[in-house]
Amino acid sequence: MSLKHLFPFAGDHAIQSAVVVVEWAAPGGSGHLAADHLQQLQSVALPKLAELGLGASEILNVFELQMVPGKAASHSSQVVGGFKASRPSPTGGEARSVMLTRENCIIQIDDYTRWAKAKHDIREYLNVLLPLVGTTVPILHLTLQFNDVFLWKAPPDELIMTEVFKQDTTWLPPHVFSIQNLWHSHHGYFCDQVSPCNFKQLDNVNVSRSMVNALESVQALVAHRASFANPIWVKQPLSDDDPISQVLDRFHDDNKTILADLFSDEVLRRINLLSS
């Protein structure tokens, strides 16, 4: 059976979205950015992000509730909780966006073409924001996530899992190969890294057969998260040699390694991860 009816989401690759998350706040809210700092960041960063093509912007407000011990009365106020800059997609929605909140910065690339281009743009966005964030808080965590999607345009009973995935892959339980229906598999694990710095790496591998716009699809959402042993203070723009850039490259390579062990050779050729 041919996989000619299995279409990678973006034609020559399957990446629907790539997401980078930079976190500085610890659980419980310690280390988050104050409202006055966020206002300063907003005024400086939004014009620079607009110059980088993210011209649409919005302010994110949050409500704060102050409770007075022993009293029934409380006081609520609306304060700046962050901001978002984005670029619209020709087909509607957003092609990419950068959102900065008290706790983190989230960059989403929905018009992904190749890693070199995406990394260049991601670093440009981070170079606008992180030196400003680094005046008060260090970076604690860094995440890179890819969502690969394949659409099946044929009768569902003709989609054979043993042709889509390697049967000896470490990332799927054998049970999925006998199911002719929708399913989801999640596998997460930690490992310790010492290069380019000391950090604990969490990899989450989510694979599913699901429905997308009434079409059956195969998805692999793989996320890699670094928790740094020593928080990173970003005072200057990032370079190719700084730990954050190197960890992102490492995660990209790890992602390709997982996909190469997960998908069949025919699927890998369809997304240019295996030579013909």
Image (cartoon, rainbow, N blue to C red):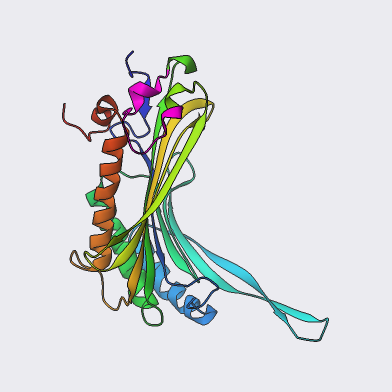
Reply yes or no: does residue 160 show up in magenta: yes
Q: Is residue 197 above or below residue 136?
A: above
Query: Which residue is the extreme one toward the top?
Result: 1
- In the displayed structure image, the side of residue 238 where residue 57 appears, left or right: right
If the image is split into quadrants, where does the N terminus sit? top left
Q: Is residue 136 above or below residue 192?
A: below
Q: Residue at x 18, y 66 (%)?
A: 241
- In the displayed structure image, the side of residue 74 where residue 263 appears, left or right: left
Is residue 127 in view from this perspective?
A: yes
User: How many numbered circles are shown?
Assistant: 0
**In the rendering, at what x and y percent does residue 13 appear?**
30, 35
Q: Nearer the viewer, residue 270 or 179?
A: 179
Is residue 155 in view from this perspective?
A: no
Magenta highlight range: 159-175
Q: Nearer the viewer, residue 113 or 262?
A: 262
Q: Nearer the viewer, residue 6 or 70?
A: 70
Q: Nearer the viewer, residue 251 or 132?
A: 251
Query: Which residue is the extreme one toward the right?
Result: 72
> To which quarter of the image does residue 198 belong?
bottom left
If the image is split into quadrants, where does the C terminus sit? top left
Majority secondary structure in the magenta region = loop
Q: Residue at x 27, y 60 (%)?
A: 247
**In the rendering, at what x and y percent does residue 258 appear?**
30, 42
Q: Is residue 81 above or below residue 160?
A: below
Q: Residue at x 37, y 70 (%)?
A: 129
**In the rendering, at what x and y percent does residue 221 appear?**
41, 43
> To which quarter of the image does residue 45 belong?
bottom left
Q: Residue at x 21, y 65 (%)?
A: 196
Reply yes or no: does residue 256 show up in magenta: no
**In the rendering, at what x and y percent does residue 195 appear?**
21, 64
